[in-house]
Image (cartoon, rainbow, N blue to C red):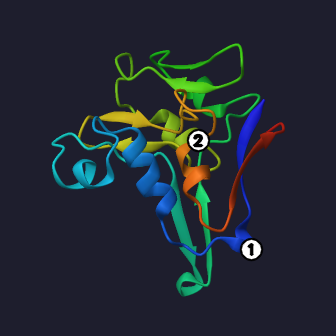
Amino acid sequence: MKRIYMIEDVCIGCHLCEVACITEHSQSKNPVKAFLHEENRPISRCTVEEWDGGVVSFSTTCRHCDEPDCLRACISGAIQKNDSGVVRIDTEQCVGCWSCVMACPYGAVQRNLKKKKANKCDLCPDRTSPACVDACPNRALVYKEGSQK
């Protein structure tokens, strides 16, 4: 299965992956409209982490693990893994208990406090490659075949 991998050495901490993710999951698919005019703007499903005053930076996103801890921790059954290996959250079924947030060893599941639901990368199912990968100016994010955990 294809997954997103991060190359820490070339990440410049620009946060364009976050902007691309929010835009892709917005109603308008337009960055200006998504950020300034949409009432229910989505939160990013990837997060840029910065260490040592920004000297070290990298994007954290879901690894779509072979044996996901978040799935096992989900008390409502909202997290499912499909036949192609993509781990998704059914937000209608999510009860906002945050068990998945605590269980993920990568910190890739976020809390959407506005909606009181868990949030994570869905690999942009309507695209051939995730928006964050396409937006990265230094190619610090790559989308390729591999296994995880």
Do residues under tags 1 and 2 come within 8 Å of each other at their CB atoms?
A: no
Q: Quadrant of residue 119?
A: top left
Toward the right, the furthest residue is 146
Relative side of 10 to 28, left or right: right
The residue sitting at 50% across, 71% down in the picture is 14
Q: Is residue 40 left or right of residue 118?
A: left
How far across and down, in percent of the image, does residue 74 sit? 51, 24
Q: Is disc 2 placed on a helix, strand or loop?
A: loop
N-term-proximal mark, 1 vs 2 = 1
In the rendered image, which residue does mark 1 sit on? 9
Q: Which of the two residues, 83 or 79, is positioned nearer the viewer here?
A: 83
- How busy is the neighbourhood of tag 2: few (under 14 within 10 Å), some, or many (20 plus)? many
Task: Give the mark toward the camera: 1 or 2.
Answer: 2
Distance CA(mark 1)–CA(mark 2): 20 Å
Q: Left or right: 6 with respect to 24?
A: right
The amino acid type found where label 1 is placed reads Asp
What kind of element bears circle 1? helix
Q: Looking at the picture, tell me which residue is in the foreground, 71 or 144.
A: 144
Residue bearing mark 2: 130
Q: Where residue 87 sits in the image (x, y, percent)? A: 61, 26
Q: Quadrant of the C terminus?
A: top right
Q: Is residue 148 above or below residue 1?
A: below
The spot of residue 84 in percent (x, y) is 72, 19
Residue drawn at point x = 75 percent, y = 35 percent: 2
